Image (spheres, rainbow, N blue to C red):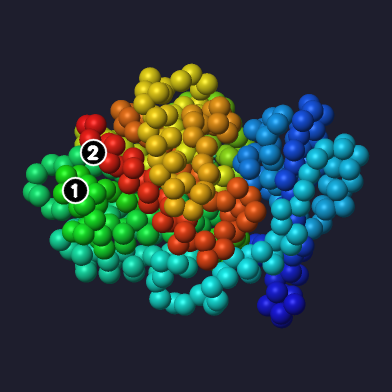
Amino acid sequence: MSIYEYICVHLCIYELYECALFFRDKVFRLKPVLEEHVSLIKELCVWRPLQVDFWRPESPQLVTIDIDVDIRVPALYLDMVSTRLHQSDMEHEVLIEDLEEAVKRERDSGPTPRAHSYTRYNNWDTINSWMNSITSSNSDLISKMFIGNTYEGRPMNVLKIGRKTGSGKNAIFMDCGIHAREWISPAFCQWFVKEAVSTYGSDPQMTSLLDQMDVYVLPVINIDGYQYTHTSNRMWRKTRSRKSGTSCIGADPNRNFNAGWCTLGASSNPCSDTFCGYSPESEIEVKNVADFIRKNKGIIKAYLTIHSYSQLLLFPYSYTYELAADHSELMKVAEGASSALRSLYGTRYTSGPGATTIYPAAGGSDDWAYDLGVKYSYTFELRDTGRYGFLLPESQIQPTCEETMLAVKYIAAYVQKNI
Ligand code: ARG
Ligand code: ZN
């Protein structure tokens, strides 16, 4: 252990500083098949509230029979949890033996350079300066639109990509990084922008798309949270907003949209990882995005939001089990996009409405955009299915982005033809 780690561990023990090291923490996959198993899993967070970190689903309330449940158990609780698991006879496996080691291995392409790279996990400062430079070197195709500051005062900018025609064009809106720890997501938005500018003029599909439509890309919604995962706690999910009366920080931005807000699959406990916030759009990042989409709702024809992990292509609804009015068309397009994605490396995606495909969870951006009138509204959950989870190695950035491009381009082509 380095001297830095040693000091950090001690500060952590006395809870003086959140440095969040993960020595010997394990990630388990549990396979509940009986009601008793489900209650045991729910009980895990009762012992010492919120010390078990739910990776999938994101909170114990969402656990049901027959779904795989991935949880991170801090080293301190391992004995307790293992004993209970064995007593209950629930099938389970260890996905990650030592999370701290896995965090180190995530950057498997070597020490991170200061300079921006499409195949590395760039921090916010690097992404921010990359946005400036790619905008100025492609001024014929990209313009930067400021949509407001984050809670901690970082500027949120949307990149508007498309041939500048002077007349109003229809558009696709895509955002990444709503959940801080899902690092592959911002990496995909950056990749998309690069592909757009480098294949415009040579790839007929990209050329026609950007001639006819604009693509609005917000590379990181939850910038404060994303930065925090780089400096302090790799496993942070929420925003970083504070409120007097609780020491718990942040809300889940994907439970904070005004779509069945806080009715299902969300928590009203500010300490929970799925806290819905104090009111719809209480998170300034959510409000900035919602305001932008509302202002442009006449031209925005598709809404894409990128998460990880699980390899899913979801569409509305998640706040209700009712099927969306456009269910069959949304399903058909999702299946086309998934098979396009699979054609490259064989990666399999499951498509369907959020509520039945994973779990009901209200307050999501996809449902909100759909109810606003943006028909083609999709949530991607990128690689993998749990081998690395949020800690997808950097060596997988390129293949993940390449295959995801095929799905996004499939949806874009469909939208272009059908509006
Ligand atoms: N894992 C994502 C989340 O929990 C799934 C989002 C699906 N859409 C939704 N509206 N819940 O945010
Ligand atoms: Zn997410």
Label 1 CA crowd tier, 10 Å (few <14, some 14–19, many 20+)? some
Q: Quadrant of residue 11?
A: bottom right
Label 2 amino acid?
Answer: Gln
Q: Which residue is depicted at the point 63% across and 69% down?
A: 104
Numbered label tally: 2
Q: Which residue is depicted at the point 32% across and 46% down?
A: 409
Q: Which residue position is annotated with label 1?
A: 208
Element on which disc 1 rests? helix
Q: Which residue position is annotated with label 2?
A: 416
Front residue of 5/346: it is 346
Element on which disc 2 rests? helix
Side of 356 relative to 8 (left or right): left
Front residue of 58/249: it is 58
Label 2 CA crowd tier, 10 Å (few <14, some 14–19, many 20+)? some
Which corner quadrant holds the C terminus? top left
Q: Is mark 2 within 8 Å of ligand 1?
A: no
Q: In the rendering, at what x and y percent does residue 97 appear?
A: 75, 59
Q: Which residue is depicted at the point 55% across and 55% down?
A: 181
Side of 8 relative to 307 (left or right): right
Q: Are marks 2 and 1 in contact (CB under 8 Å)?
A: yes
Q: Quadrant of residue 356?
A: top right
Q: In the rendering, at what x and y percent does residue 50 appear?
A: 71, 45
Which corner quadrant holds the N terminus? bottom right
Side of 313 relative to 43 (left or right): left
